[in-house]
Image (spheres, rainbow, N blue to C red):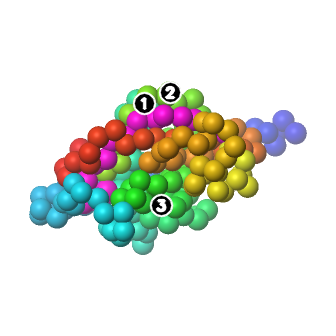
Amino acid sequence: MILGAAGLAAYNFWDANRAKEAAQQVSEQLIEKIDENVKSDETAAPYMDPNTPMPVEEIDGYDYIGILEIPSEELSLPVMAEWDYARLKISPCRFVGSYYADDLVICAHNFDRHLGRLLSIDIGVDVYFTNVEGLTIHYIVTNRETVEPTAVEQMIENTGNSETSLLDWDLTLFTCNLGGQTRCAVRCSRVEDAQGTAK
């Protein structure tokens, strides 16, 4: 049993490092593409029509919608346009929603260099999302709650019974809590108008 536990720990450590390196490589390529889009004046307008399709950039066969940054946690992560378990091994993914409609939900594994740090993130922390055209949206963390894996409506629509789950939000980040039996959902509100420039 001790050898089995040690083997599992070693695998988890390896997998977390692999995920960190995969996300970092994609981030570097995505930042280059964003810089190119900004220089060519393809930046999105500050006004955001909720019905506008989100632009994407393809890297290694996957579509990405932008980069998620949490400066206090020293995190800068690419975000894929769609999610599945294979994609989650590379980077955080859009679960549902859109930054144009202020209902974007992003999911990721709880690797330390993905969204594992959400489990202890402070209320009031700044979060930034920069789309592939250089449009940066500033959010602030307003709430952190525990959600059951089956409570999909509560995750994406805030229809839970608790007072905190009924708070309005513009962005949700979620990952598994330790043990994987529940989800940690971090709610964020947009605090200023989007800026049509890359960070």
Q: Position of residue 125 (x, y in %)?
A: 42, 30
Foreground mark, 2 or 3, reads: 3
Q: Name the residue rendered at 46%, 55% in the picture.
A: 103
Give the Cα separation between the discs numbered 2 and 3: 24 Å
* Residue denoted by label 1: 125
Q: Amino acid at mark 2?
A: Asp
Q: Secondary structure at mark 3?
A: loop
Q: Name the residue rendered at 48%, 61% in the picture.
A: 97
Q: Position of residue 147 (x, y in %)?
A: 68, 44
Q: Secondary structure at mark 2?
A: loop
Q: Position of residue 27 (x, y in %)?
A: 36, 52
Identify the main secondary structure in magenta.
strand
Q: Earlier in the sequence, mark 2 or mark 3?
A: 3
85 and 105: which is toward the camera: 105
Decide if residue 93 is in sight here.
no
Q: Are marks 2 and 3 in contact (CB under 8 Å)?
A: no
Using the image, determine if residue 126 lies above or below residue 65: above
Boundaries of the magenta span: 131-146
Q: Are marks 2 and 1 in contact (CB under 8 Å)?
A: yes
Residue 8 — which label?
none
Using the image, determine if residue 6 lies above or below residue 20: above
